[in-house]
Amino acid sequence: MTTDIQSTMLKAKNCEVRAATLIKKGNYPAALMEIRKAIGKYELLVARYPNSPLYNDWYSKLDDLKGYEKKLEGRKEVSIETIKEGTSVSTEECAEVGERVDPETNKLDFSKLAGMEKIKKILRRTIEWSLKEKEKMEEHGLEPTKGILLVGPPGCGKTYLVKCAAGEFKIRLLIASPASTFNKYVGETPKAVRKVFQCGEKLTPSIIFVDEIDKLLPDPSRSSDSSGVTGQALSTFQQEMDGAQSGTGFIVMMATNDPELLHPALSRTGRVSYRLYIPPPDKPTRAAVFRINLDAPKLILDPEVKNFDLLADLTAPQDGWYYASSDIEEICRRAKEKRFEMIIESGNEEIPLTLDMLKDAIQSLKPSISPKQHKRYEKWANEFSG
């Protein structure tokens, strides 16, 4: 038996074992992925070695696996059972952990995300490869992504970016934050951290997104914690991150508006794979935000408004002040609201949205990112981003 046959058979068997484990946990979508990987391995063997004495065994195994595939295709719900030895998480507890976004209901993807082309490229290779090409990565000496940290001013699309990534790769998303999740476990932060990761593991393939990570894992030199809970939380978080790296089927993403307040361990190379700066939108991104937000079935645009580069110029930085993406979304909303008011008053739905309406909206909304804020984020990016 050749080394290639032995290696391929072993990989197929490992996929079957992982699938069986996932089925016991009730994680049918992830089990289905493993079954399909095993099918691919056996199909490869059948195609490459038709004269092998094991050919009939492989063909029989393919039939069995394809039968399992059909059964699993109809079982999309994930039941929450025992995850780790001595640990149990109920459906109700996972509902309290944070917001869950399923592929079936997530209508976002990268086509809905303005700009950020470099970041999209990084996420495409880190998330897609880590979840779908883990074995191939290992063969070529690459480790799965350890974690991704997003840093930038409020309103520049960090959470929206994560939702678009989950939709792009059609995987589940679990959003946890200190305000919505960890405040429910006052004094028990390590327990809350474990619960988030346990539920994220049950929902694999998935993204676990921890917003405001600086509030969960603050810099101890700036923290008044004297109970040791912060240190325990960091230790627990790092242990769970190691689980993500070992290939349990989820990616960890984190975000902060205040990188200076973050525990230094999460700003060092080795703890996270990527630290990505999400800056205020540049001209192409501003134009794209206008284009996306001025698109609706009955929204008629005056010809001047379709010059999105002009709109981007009208919202260019001035005196060090920058419009965030959320500011531009609000500008569009105010202009559309003005048009709709005119439609209601006149009964005429053919009234176009004009450049003057958008200019008035721009004049009514001050940019939200100050020169001081922008300088602060640029300084962090120059030191840590990458």
Image (cartoon, rainbow, N blue to C red):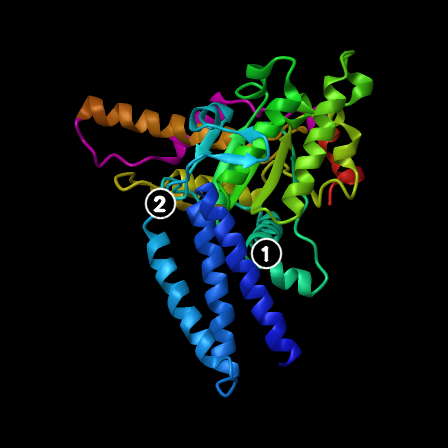
Residue lying at the far right of the rendered structure: 221
Number of marks in the image? 2
Q: In which quarter of the image is the N terminus?
A: bottom right
At a point 47% along the width and 49% down the height, the residue shown is: 30
| Left or right: 229 as drawn, with respect to 302 | right
Label 1 belongs to which residue? 129
Q: Quadrant of residue 152?
A: top right
Q: Please, is residue 66 above or below residue 255 in the view?
A: below
Q: Which mark is residue 303?
A: 2
Q: Please, is residue 208 above or below residue 70 in the view?
A: above
Q: Where is residue 344 in the image (x, y as percent from the top left)?
A: 21, 24
| Left or right: 96 as drawn, with respect to 198 | left
Q: Can residue 171 be seen in this view?
A: no
Foreground residue among 321 and 209: 209
Q: Which marked residue is nearer to the observer: mark 1 or mark 2?
A: 1
Mark 1 is surrounded, within 10 Å at the Cα level, by few (under 14), some (14 to 19) or many (20 or more) other residues, namely: some
At a point 28% along the width and 27% down the height, the residue shown is: 340
Range drawn in magenta: 347-374
Q: Please, is residue 234 above or below residue 184 in the view?
A: below
The amino acid type, in three-letter code, at marker 1 is: Trp
Q: In which quarter of the image is the C terminus?
A: top right
The amino acid type, in three-letter code, at marker 2 is: Pro
Q: In which quarter of the image is residue 231?
A: top right
Residue lying at the far left of the rendered structure: 347
Q: Is residue 93 visible?
A: yes
